[in-house]
Image (tube, coloured by chain):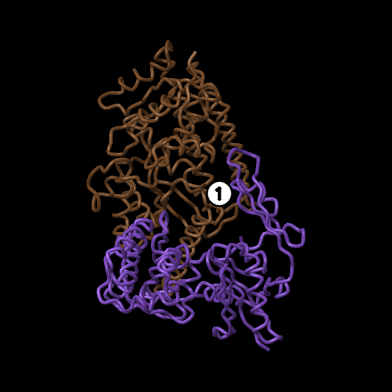
Chain colours: A brown, B purple
Amino acid sequence: MVKVTFPHMGHMWLCVKAMLEYLGVAVVIPPPSSKRTLALGARYGPEFACLPLKLNLGNFIEASALGADTILMAGGCGPCRFGYYAQVEHAILRDLGYRYELVVLEPPERHVGQLLSRIKTITGNNSWKRVYRGIKLGYQKIRAVDELEREAHRLRPREIVPGSTDRAFQEALKEIERAADLEELAAARGRAGETMRSVRIEERDVLRIGIVGEIFTLLEPFANLDIERRLGRMGVEVDRSIYLSEWVNDHMLFGLIKGLRSRRDACQAARPYLKHFVGGHGQETVGSAVLYARAGYDGVIHLLPFTCMPEIVAQSILPVVSAEMDIPVLSLTVDEQTGEAGLMTRLEAFVDLLERKRARKNVEGRICFG
Amino acid sequence: MVKGYLGIDVGSVSTNLVFMDETGRIKESIYLRTQGRPIATIQAGLRQLAESLPPKVTVRGVGATGSGRHLAGVITGADIVKNEITAHAVATSTLVPGVQTIIEIGGQDSKIIILRNSLVVDFAMNTVCAAGTGSFLDQQAARLGVPIEKFGEMALLARSPVRIAGRCAVFAESDMIHKQQMGYGLSDILAGLCEALVRNYLNNVGKGKEILPPVVFQGGVAANAGMKQAFEKALGCAVTVPPYYNVMGAVGAALLAREKTARGLPSGFKGFHVAQVEFVSDGFACDGCPNSCEVVEIREERRVIARWGDRCGRWSGALVERKTAI
């Protein structure tokens, strides 16, 4: 029987695992991305490739040691280089002597049937009805995890006991992970919600920062040096421009699920600055910065992997957005360096900037309105 | 009796201390080379400071900044530990009211800070490249056999600075060697190097920033008159090098300490005697997960006073109840 693995991207593993195991497919989850993963990927990946390629590669090498023999991965079609990473990584692994089968899920170009037929190569003899329920289970888990993350973002800057949100969040994630079908998941969501509500908080006047940028860097805490937790501990409430459930809805499910935030809103908001697709999430990055400014956020942090073309386009446009919408923007480039000191200096300075800006606004407000 | 505030800036290349009286006047400033031994350097700085100050001195507050700020914080018992961007901005907007752009070039980093109405509105630091920092100038001066102190005045003698590619420090060096072999004069090469560094700085650190006068140039490299002139040429406006330009971070830390203790809070300063206390810092690799975090432990006479470097908080969290401003 095949043993399927896939690269890490935040909590995505939890959802893909649920879907595949529901369909009777054996799954090997790579160990969480670590410095070892990065060292492996950097050794064998091309030097000029971006961080996601190196971490993917490291994930696959580590998963192979655990018995994985088939890679399931997303594809794409330019201008972002990620579109052919599946093939490039597969070729590198083959050169290194790893025998991996490769299944690429390209975003469906014409109809959902294409996607389904690719899924079928992995799911084998399951009935379509069961496949449907498997996908639904995976998707509902993504929704559940995203909800928990949003809640954690709200609680962290307000928690009374430092670290209590993170402990509750890990606990709640385990609840979601354990659910084997849709019925169990419904109950697990309830319990996970309870766990999050047990975190004691107090009302504080917190800063709000929107995090925008490239999807992998946004979703994978190892890649972004845990920026959401760091900001949370510094007393900042964060939101990010992309959650996995929204991305899947936009790109895999044709926006069938209603009521979710969509890339269309971001692209619409980007129009005064950037009218067309530049690959990856460049357009969404610009548009999301505009949306955060409109929503009254204190600042925006822009994350990108070093050498990421679509985000470099966005980075060169953001100063204009920042000036016109009066919202401070900090661009952070991530690469192989894992030194935290530089990141903390920038985050602290940015938070200081926002605090002082808000303090002045409050003073001016009082003067204006007596 | 003298009362005042202590500011400490522990950078990669230099460690600076200032003592500021209650009116904001700098009474003493000390500039030392860190030489990879931050603890010993902080202690040496404290010893020197204690000797040069009158015996009856009251420290009302201590502020620490720079890449070694946490270390300085736990050793002295600082009241405030702040990043160097905030510290520099506070110092400059106090000493040069109305400043709109701060160019700061230190040993291994360079930054730009944009202020409007004495409020920081934007900033950037160099990321993946160290071309255009003091270390590079140091190296090239040594290679050319020019004492770094003389670098600036020699560059000012240039009649037609040569063009040197400044994108990458390594290629800048080979470009410069080529120009030497061709027979260009030393002054013209030094001035060309300054211009290359300025171009690199403006293209990388200053990218996308609106640089408006008054422009202030500070950090160790601001001592180099050739660099100041190259900035003025590239920006087309006057560039000011303020007094205390090389200890501005420490001045900012002292000002922040004054702000922090303004409501009459007692200082956490342990006293100048910490210069004699034995501090040991030690690192170990955590074996809790594949991240193998390199945890640093600081001990004061065998008592662990701080730990950092772990991603998950397993080690630093164990000391959380005694945590100060980290």
Up-down relation of residue B234 to residue A236 (above or below): below
Up-down relation of residue B290 to residue B97 (above or below): above
Left or right, A313 with reference to A341: left
Q: Which residue is mark 1?
A: A155
Left or right, A23 with reference to B70: left
Front residue of this view, candidates A320 and B142: B142
Up-down relation of residue B231 to residue A249 (above or below): below
Q: Is residue B60 visible?
A: yes
Q: Position of residue A283 (x, y in %)?
A: 29, 46
Q: Position of residue A6 (x, y in %)?
A: 46, 28
Front residue of this view, candidates B248 and A162: B248
Q: Position of residue B8 (x, y in %)?
A: 58, 72
Q: For the residue carrying disc 1, how many other residues have a C-alpha within 10 Å: few (<14), some (14-19), or many (20+)?
A: many
- Chain that bears disc 1: A
Q: Helix, strand or loop at disc 1?
A: helix
Asked where in the image residue B57 lies, by quadrant, the reply is: bottom right
Look at the image and tell me in which quarter the N terminus of chain B lies.
bottom right
Q: Residue at x 28, y 36 (%)?
A: A78
Q: Position of residue A80 (x, y in %)?
A: 31, 39
Q: Amino acid at mark 1?
A: Leu
Please identify the residue farthest to the top as the structure is shown.
A125
